[in-house]
Amino acid sequence: MTLSHYLPAAYLGGFSSERGARRTRRVWVLRRGAPGPTLTRAQKLLRVRGLYEPSPVAPVDLERHWQRYERKLPSVIEMLVSGSVMDAGTWLHVLVPFVTGTLLRGPEFERRLRQRIAGIDPDLISQGNENGARLIESQRLFAPVMAAHWVVLSSPESELVSSDLGWVHASPYDGQNIGVGIVLDPRHVLMLVPEVARPVLTWEGSGWVATIERGVISGAEARGLNELQAHRADRLIVGSSPSVLAPLRSALNGPRIDAPEPLGAWGIDSWTLVVHEFEWWRLARAINRSPAEITDFELSFAIANDDDFWPAVVLQ
């Protein structure tokens, strides 16, 4: 059985102060119960043997499947945090699956799945079924992730950390609409705030670009986000230096605050997710046309460019 990363090493390496390939960079890690932070290579973190092994229920090699967007992740995250214009194809084939994968690739997804179905049929709980559920869940999360309001916030006063969970519930606004936050690197966090509908792409004359807002968080907000990361972490948090991790030791070693469903507060029922579960594929066709050429949003599962990430399709 292979070792499977549930948070990409290409992502974790972005918290290192070293240069070179992200996967081989060393990052500072604070583990639950440890006396202090230690240096560890990103490629050795957050691996579970056999986590994504193919089965009759989920015959797809999920590790290799997700590597298709991971290989472009370092350069795309750098584009995102720099404020560069994000073309629709890169947003759709790299960032949307990265965000969606962060919400379901980890072991905590299995805990949430057990809680969902324990009262229905405990016999449904098995590793094969869990990975089959990951595929179904991913295609149902694409639409709300795309429709969410995307905001990249910079943190000029305080450095940010990440955890083995990879995401937290947070909001960049007044707290009325609780969204999901994914820290991208020590100075930037991506916030997704739930929206029923919004213009996800804008036509710029020669192509479509993603609609992404920019903002800033204060030092106090950044430190509060770090505390939340530590409270929600399963086993560890990751940062660029011992000084940013050390103050979080008591929060990490305290009672863990279990994370509920990532989209639990978004007000989206399961039937709505089912109705819109193939919108990613429709949009993937539309971005190759100008506004004048779009007469409908056809549904086709044919892969247009094999170099890009394309979701595995589960037809129930």
Image (spheres, helix red, strand yellow):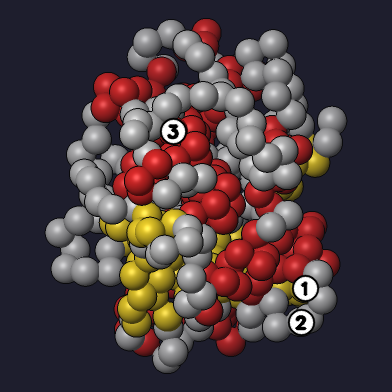
Nearest to the observer: residue 299 or residue 144: 299
Q: How many marks?
A: 3
Residue to which mark 1 is pinned: 26
Secondary structure of the residue carrying tag 2 is loop
> Residue 185's x, y, as percent?
56, 73
Amino acid tagged 2: Glu
Q: How far apart are marks 1 and 3 (CA)?
A: 40 Å
Towards the viewer: 121 or 262: 262
First of labels 1, 2 by sequence position: 2
Residue situated furthest front in the rendering: 292
Q: Earlier in the sequence, mark 1 or mark 3?
A: 1
User: In which quarter of the view is residue 132 placed?
Assistant: top right
Query: Disc 2 or disc 3, which is closer to the eye?
Result: 3
Instruction: Give the crowd class for mark 1: few <14, some 14-19, many >=20 residues within 10 Å.
Output: many
Distance Cα–Cα, label 1 vs label 2? 7 Å
Is disc 1 in contact with disc 2, using a CB cutoff of under 8 Å? yes
At a point 25% along the width and 55% down the height, the residue shown is 178
Percent x, y for residue 224?
35, 74
Which of pointers 1 and 3 indicates the residue nearer the eye?
Answer: 3
